[in-house]
Amino acid sequence: MTAIPEDIQKAAAILLSGGLVAFPTETVYGLGADAENPAAVAQIYAVKGRPSNHPVIVHLAPEADLNYWAESIPEEARKLIAAFWPGPLTLILKRAAHIPDCVSGGQDTIGLRCPSHPVAQALLRAFKGGQGGIAAPSANKFGHVSPTTTRHVQDEFGVGSKSEVQCILDGGQSEVGIESTIVDLSRIATHGPVLLRPGHISAHDIAGVIGTAPKIPDAAAPRVSGSLDSHYAPNTPVALIETDELPLILQRLATGGQKVAVIHRLTQQLPDTIAQLFLPETADGYAHDLYAALRLMDRAGADVILVEAPPRDSQWQGVNDRLDRAGHDSVGIIERLLPLEW
């Protein structure tokens, strides 16, 4: 744990007074406010530029009373909690009536998670005696690449008196690197479990605990964080390219005078780039480095960031979900950049 006890107490006091605190979790850094203070939660939305109907996740200490936050806790939820909490799993449950609906975008559900990062746990235990909830989406402007270091948070919101974030707790680089898996259990009797956002904990992992594979989202599924088509996007357009197509597309773009940055898993340096990064061959290692890589390539001054498409098997589902959303608004960018003679 990097943050010192005095920092933790200061951050807890800021939350209690209605302020905003950025803090580390094992997934990404969160921008936190008192989940029971609608004015404080509204500040999160204002600072991030987040639509008011887009829910946030409430983070709880390991000792927190779940029955205070949720109307009921189905058996499937208890099994998943026993298996994966503290950890990168968010459960969508029916919201207790006394909990403000600002945390759920006006819905009757609530997203709950118990993070495993020691700084996050220390903060949660210091806040309201461990029984408070911290509403915390990722600590970045809405739709941007999520932060995995304090520097990323500072790049988004500034530092000191000029920042609307009153405190940033340092916990080093986030271990997982992409946001938590989200499973809807609020309609368990009628729809069964539904995987609303893939992450480090896979559908296979979930099925192994509850005996049922989660379904894909349906039209009536609750809205959740990170579910919009376009999300996690740098300012530079992003295009996913299959491995065997990458050299030719690089050559064609260079012929047209385009500046290209590349994120890939190949073992050799690629020509015709102004910047490139190698990411690990494993899904977990790739996820750990992904957001930092997108942020670094975004500063390279490129016209486009090419990303070698990862495998499409279940281990890579969370990574592919983030990359697909990062590139959603850039569909067709390669065709627009290529010289006409091609």
Image (cartoon, rainbow, N blue to C red):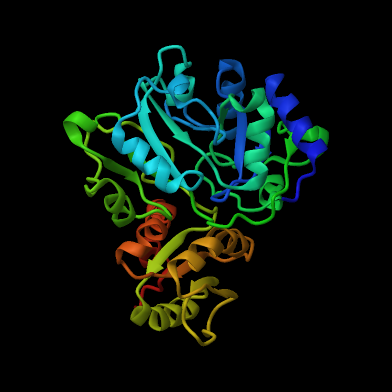
Which residue appears at 69% of the width and 55% of the height?
Answer: 172
Q: Is residue 52 visible?
A: no
Q: Nearer the viewer, residue 166 or 212?
A: 212
Q: Is residue 325 left or right of residue 9?
A: left
Q: Farthest residue toward the left?
A: 190
- Furthest residue toward top: 98
Q: Could you tell me which quadrant the C terminus lies in? A: bottom left
Is residue 186 placed above or below 273 in the rendered structure? above
Q: Nearer the viewer, residue 312 or 125?
A: 125
**In x, y percent, where is residue 105?**
42, 24
Residue at (73, 40) in percent of width and height: 168
Out of 46 and 187, give the one closest to the viewer. 187
Which image quarter: residue 48? Answer: top right
The tally of labels here is 0
Say which residue appears at 59% left-offset and 17% top-offset. Answer: 37
Horizontally, residue 108 falls left or right of residue 281, namely left
Q: Is residue 306 visible?
A: yes
Instruction: Write the residue at 60% across / 16% down.
Output: 39
With respect to residue 59, does 301 lie above or below? below
Where is residue 257 drawn, in percent x and y?
Answer: 52, 75
Whole-percent x, y for residue 4 in the image: 80, 43
Residue 81, position as x, y percentages in the image: 41, 40
Drawn side of residue 69 relative to residue 46, left or right: left
In which quarter of the view is residue 330 placed?
A: bottom left
